[in-house]
Amino acid sequence: MGISQNDLPSPPVAGHCRARAVSVDTRLPEETGVVIVGAGIAGICTALYLARRGVDCVVLEKGQVAGEQSSRAFGWLCSLGLDPLKMELTTLSKRLWRELAEELGPGRLGYERCGLLHLCESEADIAREQAWLDSVQGFDDVDARLLSNAELAEHLPGCRRPYAGALFQPSDARVEPSLATSALADAARAAGARIFAPCAVRGIERSAGRVEAVLTERGRIRCSQVVVAGGAWSRLFCGNAGVALPQLSIHSSLVRVAPLAGGPASCAAADGYAFRRDAEGGYVFGPSSGHTAYVTLDSFRLFFDFLPALRNQWRQMRVRLGRESFADLCLPRRWALDEVSPFERRRMLDPKPDVALNLKTLANMAEAFPAFRQARVTEHWAGMIDATPDSVPVIGAVDALPGLFLCTGFSAYGLSMGPAAGWLLADMLCARPPSCAPEAYRFSRFSDGSRLRVAP
Ligand SMILES: Cc1cc2nc3c(=O)[nH]c(=O)nc-3n(C[C@H](O)[C@H](O)[C@H](O)COP(=O)(O)OP(=O)(O)OC[C@H]3O[C@@H](n4cnc5c(N)ncnc54)[C@H](O)[C@@H]3O)c2cc1C
């Protein structure tokens, strides 16, 4: 008897995985209803809500469950400061996160409703926060308000820097990214979804102009619907299928320090640093600016699509040639479905962190909060954020290829929006009325002549 692809040993996955390991399935089916490409928060939440509606679905992950962005995130679940266009989806997501934390137990997700602060240096900053507040009046779950000086001092124990004020949203929360998507993957499997990792999807087969199957490194799975939830790889995957998705990757570094007593409990963003306290009392820090856009072939191809976003975020960004530029140059853009694909060549995006930037961020924090001068660094890491030209995700169908759906391009807010994105896509795949207005997320906005507005 011959050996089937299913019986082959798992290929090694190079890179450091921050996510808690989960149990996965072993025997690839010949057929399913929906195949989901990618086991980050977007793919896992889509599987969770599809399985709970009784849909037969399979998640295929080239590396490890939550091995890329979803375990490398800061861990904020927030709507504070977001464009009103994203408010309905984010509000739904915050409610779903609360329900998931109640159902699974907050410890499984590292969930805590700790609130988020935007610290203001000047009256001009306060006026900007007030203008945002005015723009989101009437949305459920927006409970943000400007704090008095006495309230601000309560939120920032040990702070020596005189801030002019702050906007605070108590309903914003945090999760532990190394736990949350893994816990939801367990919940999706318990609901009936099957998850295979490592198992790269090489591409899509069609028949009569619509999706018929996916080809994976371990064999073929017949299916009528495919969801691409491939994070920073979605553009490459779609490109080989003849679908042009405008998406670029931005490098972002974070640093964690050991538990420190008496520090602030809320998450906060300030000029020079941003932070989150973790479940053990340690802190995670990230820069408020200094994210890096590595120059790649796509930087040139998509230059005009991203020009408005670049103008908008110029102060927070650095454009560089570096290791990721060269890694990108080596990636093939086209491959046949019986060939080893780029997804097997690089199973996990584990970019090198910018340690100097992380230490500068920590120094900025220590200047404001002297207790952090003694902080002991326990981890540096980085991730590649997948961004769209308007900073709005794509959640919906690809009209040119019936059966193909996208759930990607979360532009630094995918952890906050993941459950609602999965829920909304499950509505679409089950042909149910959408739980929130889907128009802003449609893929066709990039090609139907719509005037795009950057909506961070
Ligand atoms: C440093 C950093 C900080 C962040 N902080 C926050 C935050 O505080 N709050 C917030 O809301 N968001 C944050 N984000 C953004 C958030 O992490 C992402 O938007 C979100 O995790 C994206 O989820 P995803 O499922 O779309 O992608 P990912 O988590 O990247 O998952 C995509 C998966 O698809 C797999 N894949 C790709 N192609 C294939 C293929 N062909 N076959 C099989 N598998 C494939 C990949 O291996 C990967 O595991 C942060 C991101 C970073 C990097």
Image (cartoon, helix red, strand yellow):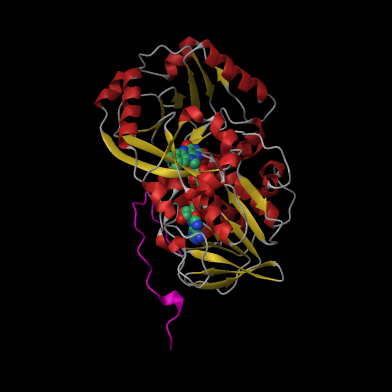
Residue extending furthest bottom?
1
Residue 250 versus residue 265: which sits nearer the camera? 250
Tell how many labels. 0
User: Residue 309's x, y, as percent?
Assistant: 57, 34
Q: Is residue 382 visible?
A: yes
User: Residue 136's x, y, as percent?
Assistant: 66, 26
Q: Quadrant of the C terminus?
A: top right
What span is colored magenta in the figure? 1-24
Residue 377, quarter of picture: top left
Left or right side of 171 for 399: right
Q: Is residue 260 above or below residue 164?
A: below
| Magenta region includes residue 425 | no
Say which residue appears at 57% left-offset and 27% top-offset. 81
Q: Is residue 163 above or below residue 212?
A: above
Say which residue appears at 45% left-offset and 57% top-offset. 331
Say which residue appears at 24% left-offset and 25% top-offset. 374
Q: Quadrant of the N terminus?
A: bottom left
User: Residue 49's x, y, as percent?
Assistant: 61, 53
Left or right side of 153 for 400: right
Q: Is residue 219 above or below residue 388?
A: below
| Magenta region includes residue 5 | yes
SS assignment for the magenta stretch, majority: loop
Q: Is residue 31 above or below residue 359?
A: below
